[in-house]
Image (tube, rainbow, N blue to C red):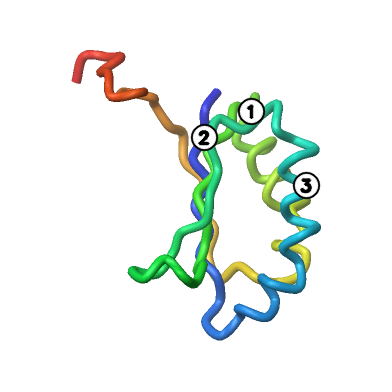
Amino acid sequence: MPFAIITRDKPGSAGVREAHQTAHKAYLDEHKNVLLAAGAMLDDEATTAHGGILLVDLESREAAEEFVQNDPFHAAGLFEEVLITRWRKAFYDRQRLVDL
């Protein structure tokens, strides 16, 4: 089941993000088999990350929650907010896949 995971960093936590970036990327590499897409949310100048969006294919909401809880960013206390919601792929590669 596809889920969207949207995280928002705590204000003033750029140092935490930087300190745990390598471990976070290794975690994503280790779990790339469940990643449909992933990336940081950036400020308008595209210079500073302030959260992330992960589209994952997991069996349940509990598995999605566990995925986030095991992320080194979570363990480091980076996130102010985490939103997990089921996701439907309606468009992909500029093509509509389902009737809207």
Residue at 52% across, 56% down: 40
At 76% across and 73% down in the image, what residue appears?
A: 19
Q: Closer to the camera: disc 2 or disc 3?
A: 3
Q: Quarter of the image holding residue 80?
A: bottom right
- The quarter of the image holding the C terminus is top left
Q: Residue flagged by tag 3: what amino acid is it?
A: Tyr
Q: Is residue 61 above or below residue 89?
A: below
Circles 1, 2 touching at the beta carbon (< 8 Å)? yes
Q: CA distance from mark 1 to mark 3?
A: 16 Å
Question: Would you name the residue on which mark 2 appears?
Answer: 3
Q: Position of residue 8 (x, y in %)?
A: 50, 65
Taking the image as shown, residue 69 lies to the left or right of residue 84, namely right
Circles 1 and 3: CB distance less than 8 Å?
no
Q: Is residue 39 left or right of residue 73?
A: left
Q: Nearer the viewer, residue 90 or 14?
A: 14
Which residue position is annotated with label 3?
27
Residue at image mark 1 = 58
N-terminal of the two: label 1 or label 2? 2
Write the residue at 55% across / 30% down. Answer: 36
